[in-house]
Amino acid sequence: MSGVEFRTVGSDDADSRLDRWFRRHYPNLSHGRLEKFLRTGQVRLDGRRAKASTRIAEGQEIRVPPNVESVSKAPGPSGTGKPQSTRTTEQDAQQLRSRILYRDAAVIALNKPAGLAVQGGSGVCRHVDAMLDALQFDAVERPRLAHRLDKDTSGVLLIGRTAKATAMIAEALRHRETRKTYWAVVVGVPKPREGTIDIPLAKQRRQGRELSMESKTGKQARTGYKVVDAAGRRAAWVELSPETGRTHQLRVHLAAIGNPILGDGKYGGKEAHIPGLSNQLHLHARSIDVPMPEGKWISVSAPLPAHMTATWEFLGFADGIEATTKGI
């Protein structure tokens, strides 16, 4: 077929996911469009059908459909058909750099703000992945996302500065060799106050939206939790330790036990809101410990965003905000 490309995977992309390869080389291609290409067999790996999550190796051949760039560009805001800009402004670059928590030759840790998407999607043109040129500094390679956070979740996000470091972080996450801690405010107080939520999850479409739902035939999902402090029976500060990494796992699990995360209307409905407190999602990736090349471990913590700081102070958790800055 005229216009079809066959591209060979280079060493810099070895052990990346196939969808991440496309995001790097075809940044205007939406995830939804890529999934359609994969489902219909228009994208192939070494002549075979593949999934977005398939790991690629150096030397493999990727079939790229014709006119990928032209069909993947989303209409502009005026409906003219012009692509939305993904250009990183100097202001965006400065803001992103100001959120660096840790940086060495292999990795950068950011304190991602709530409301900023990590990757592009339908109607999303401003996201971390599009701004990564601002974090290249003196490195030879363009930085890569090592994992993801939900758009409305704040906190520690790791960026690999080399293909090797990115692959190592992804591998550690996949094999549960990292230690991740999230902080959340939930409505009510979980009983018991410490334990493990073990509820399998599967993706389903409801009213035009894709949601993670409880499902006996779904994938295993386990979340450790502990109540750190409580404001009577009204709300609790909960520390979460996910053992698996399913989409929206923490949000679905807490809603399932009757204690939705404050501000999570998507999974908790009206019960997820408390009058007088912010309706933003109160979920924060507080810290991560991850192995790095040469046997080194890094441990990074992120301070709370402003809306969660205000809630901590209002509810009087652990003597207020001072407890949240301990160790940073």
Image: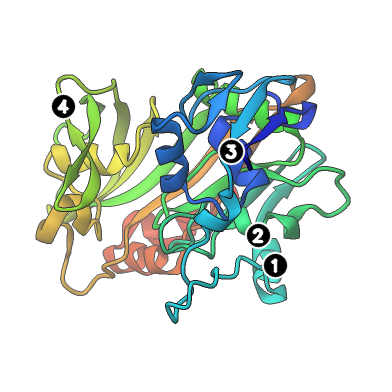
- Specify the quadrant of the image occupied by residue 39: top left
> Which residue position holds label 2?
131
- The mark nearer the N terminus, 2 or 1, is 1
Q: Position of residue 149 (x, y in %)?
A: 46, 46
Numbered tag placed on residue 20 in the rendering: 3
Residue for point 45% across, 54% down: 121
Is residue 159 positioned above or below 44 on the image? below
**Dot 2: element:** helix
- Measured in 3D between alpha carbons, the distance from the residue under mark 3 to the one under mark 1, in whole angstroms, is 22 Å
Residue for point 30% across, 33% down: 225
Give the amino acid type for the residue marked by disc 3 in the picture. Answer: Arg
Q: Quadrant of the N terminus?
A: top right
127 or 326: nearer the viewer: 127
Q: Is residue 71 visible?
A: yes
**Dot 3: element:** helix
**Dot 1: element:** helix
> Which residue position holds label 4?
215
- Specify the quadrant of the image occupied by residue 317: bottom left
Q: Are marks 2 and 3 in contact (CB under 8 Å)?
A: no
